[in-house]
Image: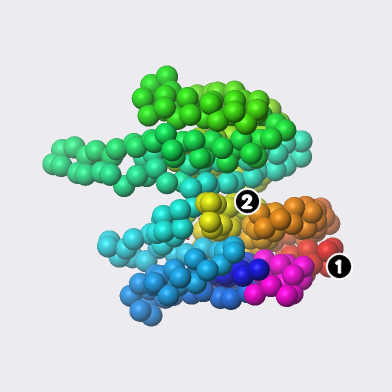
Amino acid sequence: MKIAVVPGDGIGREVVPVAESVLRHLHPDWDYYPVEVGFGRWERCGAAIGSGEMDALREADAILFGAVTTPPDPDYRSVLLQIRKDLDLYANVRPVRGPGFSVTIVRENTEGLYSGIEWALPGSACTLRVVTDGGSRRIARYAAALAENGLMTIGTKANVIKSDVLFRRCAIEEAESAGVRWEEKYIDALCLDLLMHPSRYNVVVTTNIFGDIISDAAAYLVGGLGLLPSANVGDSHAFFEPVHGSAPDIAGRGIANPVAAIRSAAMLLAHVGHADEAAAVDAAVDAACAAGVRTPDLGGAASTVQVGEAVLSRMR
Ligand code: ATP
Ligand code: MG
């Protein structure tokens, strides 16, 4: 198995080595290779990612990613957007788990309001929200597969927006043909209900920007950014990263919470066929947290490395 490891910038450089050590503990024989992407590279050679790095990512069976800082340059093009587009990572998957609930938010990652078709005129600006039949069906199929034994909630604004009428119809048809139980909710009402009654939900599927918003809102359920993992998945490539960014304010102090990165590594394991190991990693993280080994963002005094050690010792 070839694993590209991209620490990136800021706390990415602190939490990714911890997540990598968890993978190495389980699979010392896999091929782990570092890829330099981000602000550091941009400072060195004027580009946050080059074609060599893109090729290295393309060759990997899975990518473990930290975070990148956005350079202060108006012409800068987001590395993450470029990677998502070039590798066609159309599904953004964010599990949010806590006592009594387990919700996975599946966000369409390639179209909608982020299609990039937009212009500004004096006094007005326009951004096109492009939703296609193919794009909607593939994300709905992905979500339906995750919702196999549960409920698939389709979040839209189909009462107002025509592009969501299309998304809704495609999602319902795919849920029906997969034999999955589904419901639909308007995204605004869904945001509130998800926070009030998370145990009602299993898989939520929605369009690009709605998914962005509802998944950050859902972070409220687990108490913060340092805990949430995510995956960006396509038919040929898969990319795993913590939901948080590079957090320059706490970088270099050894206190970043590595749990989001470790859980991202667990998602990687599940993706490449080791669901049992993924569950064991998540259980070890839960046990370490329950024993009070926590970083300062969770009110503890442990360092990044100490949390990593506590998780590893519970896996041995
Ligand atoms: P970026 O521009 O890279 O997104 P940011 O300043 O927006 O950086 P985020 O990583 O998005 O920072 O997080 C916002 C805040 O949440 C940070 O300032 C940090 O204090 C806190 N935070 C985020 N991730 C973690 C973590 N893993 N451990 C501890 N605190 C964190
Ligand atoms: Mg941020």
- Residue 255 visible in this rendered orientation of the protein: no
Left or right: residue 85 compared with residue 27: left
Report the residue at 72% width, 33% height from top: 149
User: Element under label 2?
Assistant: loop
Sequence order check, earlier mark of 1 and 2 = 2
* Residue at far top of view: 159
Quadrant occupied by the N terminus: bottom right
- Residue 20 visible in this rendered orientation of the protein: yes
Q: Position of residue 124 (x, y in %)?
A: 18, 37
Q: Position of residue 8 (x, y in %)?
A: 51, 69
- 291 relative to 132, above or below: below
Left or right: residue 311 compared with residue 201: right
- Quadrant in which residue 146 is drawn: top right
Report the residue at 65% width, 75% height from top: 31
The CA span between labels 1 and 2 is 24 Å
Report the residue at 62% width, 53% height from top: 229
Left or right: residue 150 compared with residue 51: right
Residue at the disc numbered 1: 316
User: Residue 132 magenta-drawn?
Assistant: no
Along the line of sight, the residue nearer the viewer: 299 or 85 = 85
